[in-house]
Amino acid sequence: MSRRSKAKRRKKGMGWGEKITIAVILIVVIWAVYSFSQPPSPSGMTTGSGAPDFTLPVVDANGLTGQKVSLSSFRGKVVLLEFMVPGCTHCQKMAPDLESLYQQYGSQNVVFLTVAGPWNGASANDAANFIKTYHSSWIYVYDSSNTIFTTYGVQATPTFFIITKNGQIGTWHQGEVASETIAADLTRFNA
């Protein structure tokens, strides 16, 4: 084969080695973009793992009620577990959407359970004022020692976990979430 034939042949396209190299580079780039675009998972919490049980005091619009609630008492139902702090602006923005979702799903074997935490000095009375202000109709509990926040690896509020009927973590979201996303999760896990 002459030099001229070899030159023409090279101009026609890439060889298999070059195509494989480009494909591998594209896969690595796509994986890296996807990985870095995902929020970090709460420590120790993975989809399909058992949701750690807890028992905390109930707080309503008037303050602590003297009652306690355990997560395990809702086994057999889907639980939307929210972690929030009363002074969190993102939690405040989500409150009306959550109330709307509660009105839609609360009668469909779905429990809404909010764990209010003491970050920035928030008290049970602050949680009560939040409930009053945003007309929240579901169950709130107060984690005075921040123990359950730590157990679930919550580092930002709001953080939402969907707990399946058998007590496993179905999925989770951190920060403000579109109500359509939460609704789709509740529908999927309550099927």
Image (cartoon, rainbow, N blue to C red):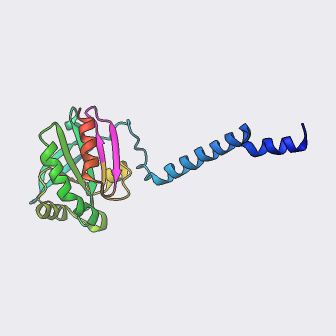
Residue 88 visible within the image: no
Q: Residue 120: give x, y in percent of width and height.
A: 30, 68
Q: Residue 112: give x, y in percent of width and height.
A: 19, 46
Extreme-left residue of the structure? 62
Which residue sits at x=20%, y=37%? 74
Answer above or below: position of 112 versus 73.
below
Nearest to the observer: residue 86 or residue 119:
86
Which residue sits at x=28%, y=40%? 163
Secondary structure that dominates the magenta span: strand
Relative side of 74 to 41, left or right: left
Q: Quadrant of the N terminus?
A: top right
Relative side of 163 to 45, left or right: left
Name the quadrant containing residue 176.
Answer: bottom left
Q: Quadrant of the C terminus?
A: top left
Q: Residue 51: give x, y in percent of width and height.
A: 32, 40
Name the quadrant containing residue 23.
Answer: top right
**Is residue 172 inside the magenta stretch?**
yes
Which residue sits at x=39%, y=39%? 47
Q: Which residues are magenta?
A: 161-174
Residue 84 visible within the image: yes
Answer above or below: position of 170 versus 122.
above
Nearest to the observer: residue 129 or residue 8:
8
Q: Residue 77: give x, y in percent of width and height.
A: 20, 35
Answer above or below: position of 53 versus 84.
above
**Is residue 22 inside the magenta stretch?**
no
Count of picture labels: 0
